[in-house]
Amino acid sequence: MKGKSWRILKDLVMIFVASLIYGAGISLFLDPNNLAPGGVSGVAVILNRLSGIDTGTLYLLVNIPIILVGIWKFGLRFMGKTMYAVILTSWATNILTPYGPMTTDPLLAALTGSVLLALGIGMVFKAGATTGGVDIIVKLLRKRYRHLKTGFLFECTDLLIVACSGLVFRNINTILYALIAVLVSGAALDYVLYGGDEAKMIYIITEKPEEIGRRIMKELDVGITYLRGSGGWTGNEKQVILCVVRRVQGPQVEELVKTEDPAAFMIVTSASEIYGEGYKDFFAEKL
């Protein structure tokens, strides 16, 4: 029970920090430069120009019906964190507005604001919630289409909203900068959600499997697996070492193999969605 309470507290703190980051991206960079970043925040920016109501307040109002759908589909327990995130984001957006813009360069605003949005959304997702709005729609789509990445789905919905912003702002430069923000945000979000799991999967065919395997386990503190193989030309039986290491450890393995057996044959590939000790939990929810 104590561990569960600690996890909940940790998630709530993460959501609080993420909401401030997200709100900063909107209030300090995107909104004051007339950049509608997509999502409900983009809708709020557009409606702000049409109505004069605070962007943060509009963000909350637009989210209400979408949250009700989320409660129906995901349950009140999951949406409780989301409602907390939406209220905090609305509050953060409003209180930070007087301090913007941090820059009047639309390109810098698009790049910085979109990265802050992606970081905020990614942190909220990792805490088991969403920032409401399009996040909930994306969550629904991810449940049905597991092969589609989160960032890609955000890009599709955001591009539609950016197109609508063109009808309001009637400025091609503003639309193009908003498109840059959407694309950068999608790529950054995928990195936040998936980049940390990316690793290198290495196959090593060598005459010294014990020596190399022992050094990998001792020096890199990672597990290895010995596979049985046979040469296609010679038919000789050999042991093949299989290991998965973090990206930064890849060069260490290469150097280690080179010093132990310069004649070794090594295959290095990128790996993601890795489950097990040291990587993802099998029972953790896939975003």
Image: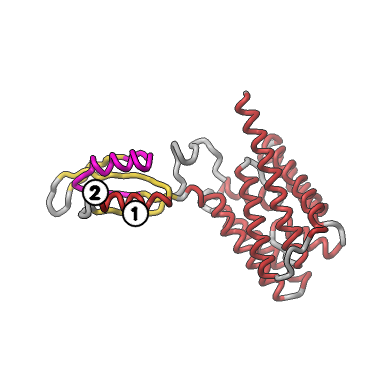
* Secondary structure state at the residue bearing disc 1: strand
Residues rendered magenta in the picture: 202-224
Please tell me in which quadrant of the rendered image residue 12 appears.
Answer: top right
Q: Residues within 10 Å of mark 1 (few under 14, many from 20)?
A: some
Q: State the mark number for residue 260.
A: 2
Q: Residue at x 83, y 52 (%)?
A: 57
Measured as percent of width and height from the top left, residue 223 is found at 35, 38
Q: Is residue 76 left or right of residue 192?
A: right
* Image location of residue 182, percent across then percent down: 64, 63
Residue at the image position 14 percent from the left and 54 percent from the top: 233
Residue at left 74%, top 63%? 102
Tell me the CA gap for discs 2 and 1.
17 Å
Percent coordinates x, y for residue 211 in the rendering: 24, 42
Give the labeled residue for mark 1: 268
Mark 2 is on which residue type?
Answer: Glu
Give the answer, above or below, for where 252 lies relative to 186.
above
